[in-house]
Image (tube, rainbow, N blue to C red):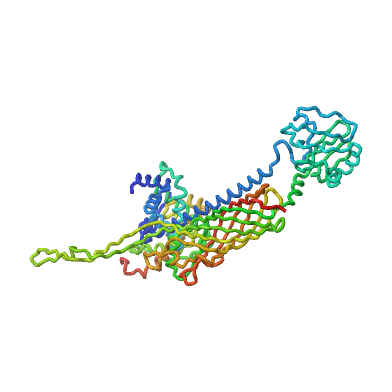
Amino acid sequence: MRRNDWFETFLRSRVQPEASGLDFENVWARLQHRRRQRRRRRIFFLLLWGLLAGAGLGFWLWNRPAPDSVPGQPVRAADIAAANNTAVPEPATEAIKNVTPDRSSTAKAVAVQEPAIKINPAAAGDFLNRIPEQYELEKNAPAEKNPASGDPANVLVHDGTAGPDWVFPRLPLIKRPIYSAVQNIDFQYVEAGLFAQKKSNKYPKWLLGMELGYGLHFVNRSGDDATWLGLRSGEETPLDIFSAGVTLRRHLNRRWFLQAGLGWVRGADRRSFTSEKTVTEIKPDQLVQIIIHADGTQEEVFSDAPVTTVTRTQGVQYNRFDRFEIPVLAGYEILPGQKTGWSVAAGLAPGLAGRNKGFVADTLPGQQISLAAAGYRTSGLVAGIIRMELGFHLPAGAIGLSLQARADLFNTTKPDALFREKRCAMGVVLSFRRNLSAR
Amino acid sequence: MIETEILRTVEACLRRDPRAEKALFERFAPRVFALARRYAPDETAAQDFLQECFICVFDNLKKYDARRGEVGAWIYRISVNTCLQLLRKTKQQPLLDFGDLPATSDEIEPDDLVQIPENLILEGIRQLPPGYRQVFNLAVFEDWPHRDIAAALGISESASRSQLTRAKQFLKSFIHKTLPSYAPQRLV
């Protein structure tokens, strides 16, 4: 234990353990404001992490391999036969033999559910010469595509000694099969998705959609009356922002698109306030004076007198800022044609009309004024929008999940208002789009 | 507010009852503010420290264990740690800025100090370089042993001892120089 000297003892005795003279109410109000801000920030980051995690999960689910086959990998005919519970075909004299798989097969036989390609044995040598050239193969067997889907058929290839040995699902997808000899066919890894890429050259030209957004918004306020602005900052807390709208998207090409729409945006502020109302009334028969006479007797004088009543109200109210706007965005698909892909878009959202509902503190102490009287505008507002979207492309349309930021480009207040204010927001937007056409 | 009432308030705070949170703040804010004033470089920073301390208290309230001590002591300890942490984060005032203190030869006697106002002492403490101020506060007001101070600030025990001695010398000198302006209050 440390030994204290007289000086330390003196200092401890002179410094009060509890401080006074501070406006603890004010500190408490600011403390609450900070805690709300922290909570909002936490919610925002949770949303962001949720969005990223959801996007990652969605991407993985969308792209994960089929349970019993590796995309693009050759499947052994023996495995298929085992799955079908059928015998492996006998060795044939031809280099390539027609094989039609059992259509009732399931599970591992997925790869051969389409009719096998039929190749004239006489042309086998030619086929094997041409097989590395997928387009040549297509030329040679145009009629062998699946008539229902138009997809190329599966091909079974013999090695010439032991019957059908390998099955290549959708052979034309194979970009560069490498094999050393007919007797020992050995195909390299087959790149999956080439066919899909080719197919995806068809991209939708027009898409009609709807969007729902949620985010948090922030206020940047300035003006000459610092005291009043300080009071308002203490009272008002920007809360969340909702948006909903319909959109029409036009793809200019595979990558670039324009999007326009009609949207409704609602931002909300919470205002915690204390107001005082002072009422002075003349009330009859009030004790207004006590006269003490020289003999010690007291005389009470009753008369009409003004009585002042101060009513202090503490309350919470919500201010709402509604906007109808026409967001126009230009965007760029980073990975066009993929089932899941990122895109970025930016643009402007000019306001059509708006409505503000609520009150803020007036410059006069204890008074409040409406948002309109305070100088908030309802028209002539323009916001800048930037977003990054993860799109899940479906045959009929697309689902998009975006991280979006928006900021007012002009003040939301009239020029003659006592303050200037701009708002910005950040949040997530969920979009549903339906293809109207395809090119 | 007796301890059982405070515990009930803490339980209500855990249920996010805003009235209980305010009551807890009102009960302990003066004490925490007195602490914050000694660590912070000025009054504005002290108010910020007070806010941060209570944010930390409310964030960690669920970790409070009544069997291990009173609520007040727990809040006070959290506040000390928060103040140290805030000073560590403030880049303009590094934790261990043990700049040279002026050599002091002025000696004062206990009788000189009878009527020294609290503000003057706080002013003197604030004039200490941040490193000295922390050692001084932890040693004198929190009564931490040098071993704990050294561990908390990442210095050696001997450094803690010497910084405390020099901080006290500086304070005595500061008070000695400032005393004439308080002459009417002195008992001669």
- Give the left or right position of residue A427, taking residue A295 as reference: right
- Give the left or right position of residue A167, taking residue A205 as reference: right
Q: Position of residue A410 (x, y in %)?
A: 55, 67
Seen as rendered, the residue at the extreme bottom is A416
Q: Is residue A132 above or below residue B92?
A: above
Q: Is residue B170 visible?
A: no
Which residue is drawn at the image coordinates 49% and 64% (left, top)? B101
Q: Quadrant of residue B139?
A: bottom left
Front residue (pair A356, B121): A356
Q: Quadrant of the C terminus of chain B?
A: bottom left
Q: Position of residue A231 (x, y in %)?
A: 42, 64
Q: Position of residue A183 (x, y in %)?
A: 89, 35
Q: Quadrant of residue B91?
A: bottom right
Q: Is residue A13 visible?
A: yes
Front residue (pair A194, A228): A194
Front residue (pair B41, A78): A78
Q: Quadrant of residue A88?
A: top right
How many discs appear? 0
Q: Position of residue A319 (x, y in %)?
A: 45, 59
- Give the left or right position of residue A336, taking residue A233 as reference: right
Seen as rendered, the residue at the extreme left is A295
Front residue (pair A30, B154): A30
